[in-house]
Amino acid sequence: MSGAPAPVAGASSTPVLEVSGAALHRGDRELWSGLDLTVNAGEFIAVLGPSGSGKTTLLRSILGLQPLSAGSIRVAGEPVRRGNPRIGYVPQQRAIGPDTSMRARDLVALGVQGSRFGLPLPHRGDRAKVDRLLESVGASHYADRRVGLLSGGEQQRLRVGQALADEPSLLLCDEPLSALDLANQVAVTDIIDRQRREREAAVMFVTHDINPILGKVDRILYIAGGRFLLGTPDEVLQTRVLTDLYGTPVFVLRAGDRLVVVGVPDAEPHHPHDEEHEHGGAA
C-alpha cells in the first residue's frame, strides 16, 4: 500500500515521527513486528484495530514509556524519551468526581507548569498562556468552574488544551472520543484537526470508530492479529483487504456517509502462524 507521504508544503523536511523495524511482544505474544511508519508535519493518522491489538502500546512506545522488542522510534529526528515536550498526549475521557476543587483553568495549567522541575509554581505569563489555551479549545466561558461539574465533552476539551501547552509537533490521541456523545465527538475532533492545520502538528489518533474522523484522516494504520496494514482510507477500508488481514470474513458496509465494519472479533487472539506472513504488505 502507500508509503511515506510527501512533506506538507512549508514544513520541515525532517519527519515528525519515524518508526523503523519496530516490534513489540507482550509475554510470549507478538503484538506486531516489522512496523515502518513515517509521519510528516500536518498529517492525520488514524490507528485502528480490535482490543488488545497493541494500539495504545504503540503510543506508549512513542512516549518512551514502553521499550520496543526490536527496531527504533525517533521524534523530530531524536530518539524517544519520557517527557518529550514535542509530544502532546490526549487520553480517553474519564469522569472527574464532582467533589474536586480543581477548576477548569487549573487542569490546563498542569500542562503549562507540569514540565518544570520541583513544585509547579506559576511563572509570569502563565495565566495569559492558560487563557489562550482555554480560548483555543472553546473553554473560556467555563474557565473558573470546578472540573467535576463539567460535562464529559467539556472536560475533554480541557485535556486537549493541556496537551497543546508546549505547542507539540506530534499529538497522540488515545481514544479521546470514548464515552462522548456524537455532538461532542464532532466538537473535540474539530478542535484537534484545527490545531494540526494551524500549527502543522502531526496527529496519531487511536479510535474504535473511524466515522467521526473519517473526513480528516490522511492514512490509516490498521493493526490486527500481529499484522498491520498502512494506507489511505480508500485503500484500507475494504471488505477484501480487512478479510485478508483478519483471516476471517469481515465486511465493510456503507450506510449513507458512514462506514460499518462487520465481523471483527471483539478481542485479539494470538495466532502463531501470523508470524509467518509478511507484515504490512498490500492486500
Image: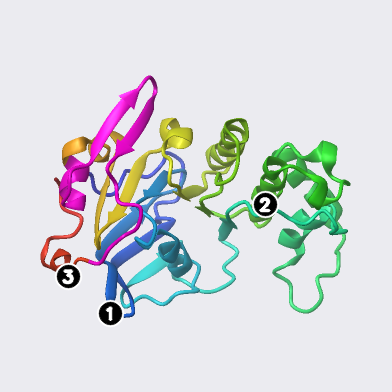
Which residue occupies the foreground of this view, 162 or 243?
243
Residue 23 placement (x, y as % from top left): 29, 71
Give the Cα separation between the discs numbered 3 and 2. Answer: 39 Å
The answer to whether one can see residue 278 in this image is: yes
User: Is residue 117 toward the left or the right of residue 181 in the image?
Assistant: right
Q: Which residues are magenta?
A: 241-270
Give whichever of discs 3 and 2 has the lower sequence position: 2
Residue 205 placement (x, y as % from top left): 47, 49
The amino acid type, in three-letter code, at marker 2 is Arg
Res. 159 mark: 2
Res. 272 mark: 3
The amino acid type, in three-letter code, at marker 1 is Asp
The amino acid type, in three-letter code, at marker 3 is Pro
Badge 1: few (under 14), some or many (20 or more) residues near its Cα, within 10 Å?
A: few
Give the Cα separation between the discs numbered 2 and 1. Answer: 35 Å
Q: What's the residue at 59%, 45% (across, down)?
A: 179
Give whichever of discs 3 and 1 has the lower sequence position: 1
Res. 264 mark: none
